[in-house]
Image (spheres, rainbow, N blue to C red):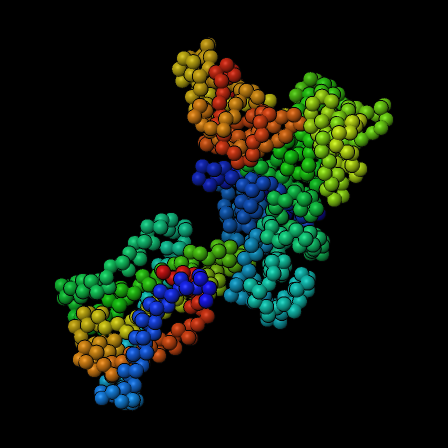
Amino acid sequence: MDEKIIEIQHVSKSFGDKNVLRDINLYVKKGEFITLLGPSGCGKTTLLRMIAGFLQPDEGAILMDGKDITGIPPHLRQLNTVFQRYALFPHLDVYDNIAFGLKLKKTPEDEIDKKVRKVLKLVSMSDYEDRDVESLSGGQQQRIAIARAIVNQPQILLLDEPLAALDLKMRKDMQIELKEMHRKLGITFIYVTHDQEEALTLSDTIVVMNEGRIQQIGTPIDIYNEPVNCFVADFIGESNILKGRMLHDRRVAFIKHEFDCVDEGFGEDVPVDVVVRPEDIYFTTDPAKCQFRAKVNSCTFKGVHYEMWVDTDTGYELMIQDYDPYPVGTEVMLYIDPDDIQVMKKERVANVFEARVTGAGKVSFLDTEFACDTEGFAEGDTVQATVSFEKVDLLDHEETADLTGHVSVILYMGDHYHLTVKTETGENIWVDTNDIWDKGDFVGIKILPEDIRLSKPAAQHE
Amino acid sequence: MNKRSSWALPYFIFLVLFVVVPLVLIVVYALQDASGHFSFSNITKFFTDKDALSTFALSIEVALENTALCILIGYPVAYILADKSLNRSAVTVVLFILPMWVNALMRTLATAELFTMAGITLGKGTLLFGMCYDYLPFMIYPIYNQLAKMDKSYAEAAEDLGAKPLQVFTKVTLPLSMPGVVSGVMMVFMPTVSTFAISEFLTNNKIKLFGTIIQENINNSMWNYGAALSLVMLVIIGITTFLQGKDSREAAEGGAI
């Protein structure tokens, strides 16, 4: 089980000037169900297509069973793919679709017949062999696509969002069947999806990707309980993501209260991000247990549980899930177990740009010229410009803006929003704001001269 | 009749006037003798007229040859045009179908002039050249359309299942592009059977095609026999369309032109 069947070493790929994958390192163990999970455009499908052989990496190598397969064309690779929209050949019936690979290998007729019948049984589609593939429903086409791939007995099955086109009920059923199939066949499954719930249900290992980079690799439980950064915490499940401060080992402050936690090694008095899952905040009636008080401001029935938003006594908003509802307006006492507080290192504490002084009182970064105090620096100097998150102004027009961009990520931090704004040149700027924006909104970005701090660049070229 | 269906009235009148009436007239004229009495004499005349029959056979032969030639040249061209890694520009596609916008008669006359200038004797070779030149775009475009809209994942799936590049083509790409080919055949074969201008200019009337005799008969006021010959051709066209039935409908959905 611990044998590595696929190894991906330092793989990078760009289309034009867009970096789709940046230095990906990953291995897949024999027989495991591994899922590449991420939002659209994160590079997961590109990575899968590289393993299949449809794309070549710009840099790096892909190894299968320890042998470099980087330049080998798809038809010579010992793996098969289930395509997103199935790609069943419309000019062939179900039987001939499944037999396609076997016929190419010049398998004897009676053996083909046996194998086709066997996989049809496995995907519960016996008696469908003479059907026209276009007459099948989405779920049935899905099964045939899987049958067509596994009949060739590949060592690895690649699945590119195979359930994306199915309705919810069907998707749930197919998830169970896929899991069952994986167990029966005992081969390696590499699965691509943007659906976090699907990934949690199916996988042995999840690889969370964003913007061409691997964010976290781990078991579903690890990923859910111990996300390494805000992106993973926000992408997987529901969460309260909050700004915090690590006071010392096993003690953290957030929402203006102090809590015991289990994390160590961050140092003393260090800014951190804190994640608390909504099901991990408990109601209590015992004042001794109470860590903070809050008032319920909304309560929605969600089927199994109730989802409540509460305003804490310190002015933060938290989401809580509980089996018992508390009416809107109720004053409640709350506590969080130390185990359930996930502390994460802050990825950044402010916007830091590499900038160039372009004249007295002028500096250029993000392909834009800004006015600021340049005392102590000469024209042409390379400097580091720091702008704190809350000092970036977002405008709904571009007339007085320094530059423009689109809101690409929104995180609610309990009392403000933390936005990632992608500029027209594809760079990111992070913004803390109380205003409500939507994902994809076009915004003008303005930074006042006094909010730009210049410093010597981190010593690297001297 | 509801309000909206009355909007179709002008088109209905147009169809009756310019499609149904002429067709009926052809049948009526074909089944009359010179004095205007009902008779099958024109039809029997054709089937006993050795010259007419051999011209007819020759027309079919030339049309078949031309269609085959157009497929042989047109398919690879369409394939290259539709392959994004070989051709990224829509302009090249337009360049290939550009000749369709120039009047066929002009092109044919110009071709004939070129042959004369180059001192090439006009005959069957030049006839086929001219026909192929005239009708090639009508073959390229439907095939190109079919290939360009084809989901690339079919070819990838075949490759994934172990097909070598040539097998991908023969087992998946070619069969899936057949509706385009069928549509192209319809647009090349049928007009070539009835053409007369190309044979007139490019062979100096040395080779007569079926279209030529129809034209000669009508020009010489032999309306009834001309109509009978037209009727024979209509039947041929009808049979071809019928034979291609399902496929051509699919191709039409693909939007030939």
Is residue A36 among what the camera can see? Answer: no
Is residue A210 among what the camera can see? Answer: yes
> Residue pushed farthest top?
A376
Q: Is residue A374 left or right of residue B117?
A: right
Residue placed at 43% from the left, 26% from the top? A399
Q: Is residue A155 left or right of residue A368?
A: right
Q: Position of residue B145 (x, y in %)?
A: 40, 58
Q: Position of residue A362 (x, y in %)?
A: 42, 16
Q: Position of residue A15 (x, y in %)?
A: 46, 41
Q: Position of residue A347 (x, y in %)?
A: 61, 27
Q: Is residue A3 left or right of residue A133?
A: right
Res. A414 image quadrant: top right
Residue placed at 21% from the left, 82% from the top? B222
Q: Is residue A10 left or right of residue B68?
A: right
**Picture layout, residue A406 above or below residue A267:** below
Residue placed at 74% from the left, 22% from the top? A313
Residue placed at 61% from the left, 28% from the top? A417
Res. B58 image quadrant: bottom left
**Picture layout, residue B39 above or below residue B108:** below
Instruction: Between residue A185 and residue A262, name the one nearer to us.
Output: A262
How many marks do you count on the picture? 0
Instruction: Between residue A40 and residue A33, name the one nearer to us.
Output: A40
Res. A123 image quadrant: bottom right
